[in-house]
Structure formats: C-alpha cells, structure tokens
Image: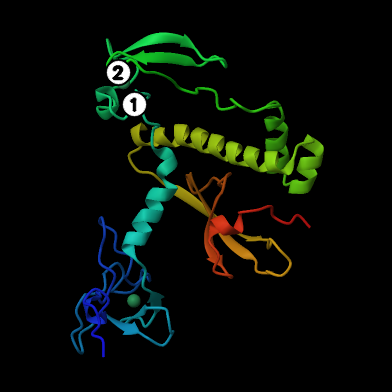
Amino acid sequence: MQKKSSATSPQNHPRIPPEFDGIQVNHCKSPVCPNYGVAAGQSSVRGSNSYILDSRNIGISSCICTSCGVGFPLKSNLGITEEVERMASYLQRPNAVCCRNAACANHTNQVPVGTVGAYASFGKTAIGNSRWRCSVCGKTFSQNTKPTARQREHHKNKTIFKLLVNKMPVRRIIEVADIHPKTFYQRLDFLHRQCQVFAAHRERALASLPISRLYLGVDRQDYLVNWLVRKDSCRSWLTSTCPKRSAACRPSGHSPTPRKLKSGRSLQQSFGGPLSDS
Ligand SMILES: [Zn+2]
Ligand SMILES: [Zn+2]
C-alpha cells in the first residue's frame, strides 16, 4: 500500500486555521460569552477545551464553543486576508508612469516621469496624450490619460449610467441607448472602473481626516440574481454591505459581494454573460 505523503497527511494539518497577518476569526462570536474573541487553541486538552471540533457536517469543519454551546464554521484566515486585499485593491494608487523597456534602468528603478533629466518630452500621440523619450535607453512611450480613449459615442456613457442606476433592465438599456450588447458590457466594466476611481479618491482621504473616534452605521442588503440559462435555474445570492459615518445616517451606496452561490459557481462565472432581464 502506498504511503501517504507528509504534505497531505491529516496529522500535519493544524487543528484550527492558523492566524495570518494578525487575523484570527475562529472564535466565539457571542458578545456575552466568556470565549468571545478568544481564539480556539491549536492543541486539544481533554476536559479543558474552550472549543470542540464538530464533525457532524461532512465537508464542513466547524467548532462548538464549550461555554455557550454555539457552533461556527472554521474559516481560513489566509483566505480572508487575500479577499480583503482583493476588495481593497481599488484604493491603491496607480503606478507611476515610467519607461516601459524592461531592460532599462529607469524601468527597473521605477523612475517616474517628471524626474529631472530622466525623460524628455516627445510631442503628443494622435489622440492627444503626452509622449516622452527615455534619456537612458532612448525609447519613447506615452500614457493614456483619457479614460474614454478608444470609445466611440462616449457621450452615451451618461445615459447608460443613469439608466443602470435607475434599474432599467439590460435589454431595455441596449434599446434606449441604441448600442450593441457587447458595447453595453464594455461600458458596464468602464463605468465600474470609474466608480471605483471616484470612491478611492474619496476614501483615501479618510486616513488623514481629523477623526478622534469614528462611528460607522452599516446597512446590509441581499440580492438574488437571476440565472443565466433556463437549464441552470440556480439563483446567485449576493450580500451587499455599506458603511457610513454616523449611525444616524442611512448608507446611500452598496458594494455587493458574493455570499452564497447555490450552484457553486464563481462570481466571475455568474456574470460571464448577460443576465436575464425577464
Ligand atoms: Zn461562546
Ligand atoms: Zn528607458
């Protein structure tokens, strides 16, 4: 019989998902319980465990708090960290414009345009963007500063955006705006990017605001999204949360995130094609 490799051997798996980057969510969530916020231990001591592992649900690892008796599924702290980073990635400032030649020192050192002596202005592109020539390698490059570059009839963006936020079905938007379905989904991605840029511009300022204690009101809404094809009649459940400063104010915008996809599809797969508007 073939011996199990040490990498896949169950005894090498930790009892509880280990803490990652200061995040450990595997603890009792009841505020009135003595174990609230106390992480489950990596070793089991008979008779004195704060939590016991629950193996009744096949395929789902979970814990039961021995103090209050409430169970909770075990979650990967690494996965949560990566998801937080993914969701917050829009807050990152765009990379500085520098030489595109990978073999050039200005590219390796990420020397930005505007550095004295590093680049020389080299006219403009056909659509009006600035072009520069690298002083080290002599290659020219430009940076697209117009989000609507390469878009024909970009004046329709405003109409599409207004119809979208007023909940008009996709097929009606395509008819009213007189655009091809492919164009609609390209504009949908474009509008999403622009909304993220706007939100990032506002939210980055939070870090420098003179706030001694921040109170946030949080609203949550669940959305049921229609299936893509009739044969696959599984609805996708998206949970949207939206914080706003001061609990007295009702949050005004929502960012849906996947909470449960009944069919096990990824969010990308669920939005890979047009959603039914019927
Ligand atoms: Zn508890
Ligand atoms: Zn260069």
Q: Which mark is residue 89?
A: none
Label pair 2/1, CB-CB below 8 angstroms = yes
Closer to us: 183 or 211:
183
State the residue at coordinates (54%, 14%). Answer: 128
Q: Where is residue 152 drawn, in percent x and y? A: 68, 27
Beta carbon of the mark 2 residue lies under 8 A of ligand 2: yes
Closer to us: 199 or 1:
1
Is 47 located above or below residue 108 in the figure?
A: below
State the residue at coordinates (57%, 17%). Answer: 127
Few, some or many residues within 10 Å of mark 2 (<14, 14–19, 20+): some
Q: Quadrant of the C terminus?
A: bottom right
Q: Where is residue 140 drawn, in percent x and y? A: 40, 17
State the residue at coordinates (56%, 66%). Answer: 261
Apparent side of residue 11 relative to residue 249 in the rendered image (left or right): left
Q: Where is residue 114 drawn, in percent x and y? A: 33, 14
Is 215 located above or below residue 228 in the figure?
A: above
Q: Which image quadrant shows ligand 2?
A: top left
Q: Quadrant of the N terminus?
A: bottom left
Is 32 located above or below residue 78 in the figure?
A: below
Q: Quadrant of residue 98?
A: top left
Few, some or many residues within 10 Å of mark 1 (<14, 14–19, 20+): some
Q: Residue 101 carries which label?
A: 1
Q: What residue is disc 2 on?
A: 137
Give the secondary structure at mark 1. Answer: loop
Q: First in sequence: mark 2 or mark 1?
A: 1
Amino acid type for the residue under numbered disc 1: Asn
Amino acid type for the residue under numbered disc 2: Cys
Beta carbon of the mark 1 residue lies under 8 A of ligand 2: yes
